[in-house]
Amino acid sequence: MNTIIIDGLSFALPLFIMAIGGIYCERSGVTNLALEGLQGFGAFCGALFAVCIASHFAGDSPVPFYLAMVAAFLGGMLFSLLHALLCIRFKANQVISGVVINILAMSLTEFMTKQINASLFQAPSNKFVLGVSARVTVPGISSIPILGAAFTNLYPFEPVIVLIAVIAWYVLYKTPFGLHLRACGDNPHAVDAAGIGVGRVRLIAVLVSGALSGLGGICFAYSISANFSSNIYSGYGYLAIAALIFGNWKILPTLGACLLFGFARSGGYELVKILEMPSSYQDLVMVLPYVLTLLMLVFFGKKNHSPRALGVIYDKGAR
Amino acid sequence: MKKNDRTVLQKIVLQTIGHEKRQPVMIPLFTILLSLLLGIVVIALLGKNPFLAYYNLLQGSGLAPKASYAGHKGMITDFTSFLNALTPMLLAALSVLIALKAGMFNIGVSGQMLAAAFISTVLIGYSDLPAVVAKPLVILTGFVVGALVGSLVGFLKHRFNINEVVSTIMCNYIVQYVVSFFINVFFVDPISRQSKNVGQAARLTLTDVVVGDYKMDIPLGILLAAAGVAAAAFLLRKTTLGFEIKAVGLSSKAAQYAGIRVGRTRVLAMMLSGGAAGLAGVTYYLGYFSSIQPRVLASTGYDAIAVALLGNSSPVGIVFSSFLITVISKGSTYMSSTAGVQAEMASAITGLILLISACGVYVKEKVNRWKENT
């Protein structure tokens, strides 16, 4: 039971932070299929930074990890500028822009990883080895049955993500800026009439999504894969998009969707282990989260609706 | 702005793409040219010869002669193997296009491809049917399975208001894991760790056919793809269903007001889209390849989204865009071995082309504003 909660959380939280970024972006009216590419590029920047500074720190020092998170945050933000530029300034089709960013991120990071490994470390390798970050257990609370598991064997990124998520929730729902952002997605002309620049709000929203995706990416790189390679592009971004649509573009229901993905996944792995099935049966259990999502949408999907101006290029003169 | 204030550059641009009627063709061409120029700059910055690299792309795709060939190989064999790679891309782009016309976004092409190919592989690929029966059956099964998955997505959207982006992503994962499970448990080849190869009778590509002095791979699927494009063009331009699909795509409310049954049209469009994806699947896994790698989705499905949009979402347009994108991806192996430019560079150039062509609306607006200022 405890393993299910521990592993489930460590998968759900990075997904959640990416989905929050997506919510910011889409609630402001910009479709964001680029999460996959943004998380990969963010993870690339973080991993590159970590391997470059690793020699200055002791082997078990957590400092490179935190710096890598900062680098991934900034890297994702930088790359999302491209999405903002295309969607807001150049009025590009937002879907095509997202797909293109995914393609570019994939080819660029793979290309640069090879080049940098060859020139900087003289090693023909297509990945940056990071290792798995150390885990912490909160003394006291962790001994509570069941609930305590949420505080056992935590990756250091988990509390950071929770903190950022709380801030993101507060900003989106309780501040004037959050109101403007949500209004941009439903009725940008009203926002414009109120004297607030639609382009500026959307730019910030896209940057937030890039930064948070990058953060999510480096968390996956430090936990599941323990390195940066093209394996990072295994669909986390698309899964985050599914989670946020499942969550009806709202932060709390999206958390529920992410937890569902996480727990169904770790629960499935645990089930295979308990029943002592051969490892190929894992694949069958891996289907669980996705089938569950579809089933739940069948029952609760009626009320879902996207932001009204989602994907529509803002045109001042349009009626 | 007075007329003589214009710069030379503006004049050239206006001369070439200023004409309103030619813009739908000229602007994509202009953006592609611009991105190829950018590619030249990037490759030159890496210290490699960009023109040689581009020429290698053509050589690798069999569109230009190489310096030397291995025995029984030649430009024509390279070209047929290029067509072999083009076939699934064209069909996948067609699938995206049909869904797009109905205002839906099929991200699940990869999953539909895999599902169709897996069922065809198991039912027909491993049977002993003679080629005359097996090949049409493979195509039929591929279409039907793809269409079933597609119509499921359409049905979920129509009946339960499930966003097709979510349901197609979910279907991708479900298909990927279920297929991987069955391959690993029942159909695995212990050496290659992939599914066992399908029989030659069922394969849609004839391999190592001796024609004259050459041994070539002949993709039968390319005829299928051509027929598919023609059928889609006919459907969209000349039939009631095509008109209804376009009407629903432009405005579902207006279509409903006009008496079009929106739900039925959507399900039908997704069915056709899934069917095309299924055909792409069988030409990919039972044509271009002959086995399925478990746990991996073909990237074709995602690239096809970009190809369809680059082709201006028109059946004729995607022929050109998939041709261009396949030249770059297929030629990249030869380019990296000859010019020393890494193969990833090719997909970066693809990205650039798509990136710049995405700005087509902006270019058009800008040019038209210049025109108004004269």
Image: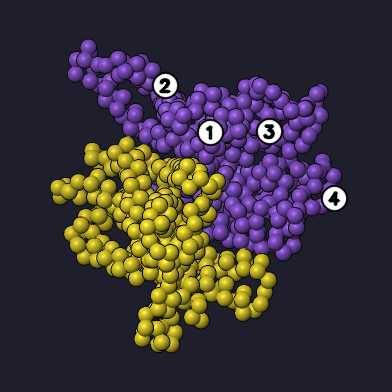
Chain colours: A yellow, B purple
Residue in the foreground of this view, choosing between B149 and B258: B149
Residue B92: percent from the left, percent from the top? Answer: 58, 42
Name the residue beneath numbered marker 4: B128
Q: CA distance from mark 4 to mark 2?
A: 53 Å
Classify residue B362 by image quadrant.
Answer: top left
Q: Identify which amino acid the numbered label 2 is placed on.
A: Arg
- At a point 32% along the width and 52% down the height, the residue shown is A74
Name the residue beneath numbered marker 1: B341
Q: Identify which amino acid the numbered label 3 is placed on.
A: Ser
For the residues tagged 4 and 2, is the chain the same? yes
Residue A250: percent from the left, percent from the top? Answer: 34, 64
Residue B143: percent from the left, percent from the top? Answer: 66, 47
Packing grade of label 4 (10 A; few <14, some 14-19, many >=20) is few
Q: CA distance from mark 1 to mark 4?
A: 45 Å
- At a point 60% along the width and 53% down the height, the residue shown is B296
Q: Nearer the viewer, mark 4 or mark 3?
A: 3
Classify residue B9 by image quadrant.
Answer: top left
Sequence-earlier tag: 3 or 2:
2
Name the residue beneath numbered marker 3: B81
Sequence-earlier tag: 1 or 4:
4
Q: CA distance from mark 2 to mark 1?
A: 36 Å
Sequence-earlier tag: 4 or 2:
2
Name the residue beneath numbered marker 2: B22
Residue in the foreground of this view, choosing between A9 and A97: A9
Classify residue B330 by image quadrant.
Answer: top right
